[in-house]
Amino acid sequence: MADLKALSEAVIKGDQNTAVEITKAALEEGTSAESVLNEGLVAGMDVIGARFKKNEVYIPEVLIAARAMKMAMEILEPELVKAGVEPVGKLLVGTAKGDLHDIGKNLVAMMLKGAGFEVIDLGVDVTPEKFVEQAKSSGSHLIGISALLTTTMPGMEEVIKSLRDAGISAKVMIGGAPVTQAYADKIGADGYAADAASAVDLAKSLVA
Ligand code: B1M
């Protein structure tokens, strides 16, 4: 019987080889892809998220854990598709127009994948037009915008306005070092998160 507790431990430690081995073994033994995902991989990322929030681990540990999860997910994903396991929600994420910072955005995207979201990452310097076009074609439930520069923050408001003008009602969450809850309220965003772990809690509450 595959040890899903050991799988979550491997994710927590960022041990990608063990994470991949246990994932393969579990599927070969007939453990459902959903159990491998929820009891192994997501359980591990949940622990990392909680520790990150309490400052018990830092960005490098989160990135290493997320990489282990990503490697195991590559094996798991085709099985999840076959089994018809629905993601928790679909999220489109990108950095605001004119902004090239992506470390925080990537961390948020990884943690959300770890929490069972389907994440479509549009990258950096994303125009409002691209957000709208991709929101329409993907039917995402959530749009995430990251900005690290005070000069690119107004781009977030433009995205929200363009989405609403296009009749898209997907919830919008924002974040990034200069962003605050007050700013999110001001521009009509549905939520703000200060860090990647809080972004997961927020995204879950917005799709609930
Ligand atoms: Co730039 N940069 N940078 N930079 N850079 C800052 C942001 C700055 C604060 C440095 C400073 O002056 N002290 C400053 C901004 C000042 C301001 O406007 N307030 C600055 C500047 C001025 C610039 C340039 C203009 C410099 C220049 O060329 N003159 C230039 C702009 C380029 C552009 O974007 N057009 C520039 C360039 C760069 C690099 C390319 C060299 C590089 C980016 C590399 C990359 O991202 N691939 C870079 C870096 C690395 C930084 C610092 C040092 C680190 C940013 C970072 O990655 N932090 C930064 C100074 C600093 O913050 N100490 C700085 C780690 C990351 C994990 O945190 O992104 O905050 P953060 O993400 C957090 C949360 O904010 C939150 O969760 C994450 C994880 O907990 N979060 C979200 C983020 N996005 C979220 C989205 C959500 C929810 C939560 O929902 C969707």
Image (cartoon, rainbow, N blue to C red):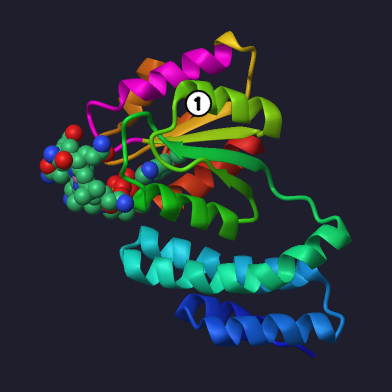
Residue extending furthest toward the top:
165
Q: Position of residue 189 (x, y in %)?
A: 46, 23
Ligand 1 picture quarter = top left
Q: Secondary structure at mark 1?
A: loop
Within 10 Å of disc 1 (Cα), the crowding (few <14, some 14-19, many 20+) is: some
The quadrant in which residue 142 appears is top right
Ligand 1 closer than 8 Å to label 1 CB: no
Where is mark 1, residue-wise? 190
Quadrant including the C terminus: top right
Residue at the image position 70 percent from the left and 80 percent from the top: 23
Is 48 placed above or below 130 here? below
**Can you give x and y, in whole percent of width and height, for residue 50 in the image?**
45, 62
Q: Main secondary structure of the magenta part?
A: helix
Dot 1 amino acid type: Asp
Name the foreground residue: 6 vs 154. Answer: 154
- Residue 158 part of the magenta-drawn span: yes
Q: Is residue 86 visible?
A: yes
Q: Give, as a single range, the part of the protein colored magenta.
A: 147-164
Question: Which residue is at 86% across, 55% downward?
Answer: 84
| Left-right relation of 162 to 208 | left
Q: Is residue 54 above or below residue 31?
A: above
Point 64% across, 12% down: residue: 167
Q: Is residue 11 above or below residue 194?
A: below
Question: Does the magenta portion include 66?
Answer: no
Q: Quadrant of the N terminus?
A: bottom right
Q: Is residue 25 above or below residue 127?
A: below
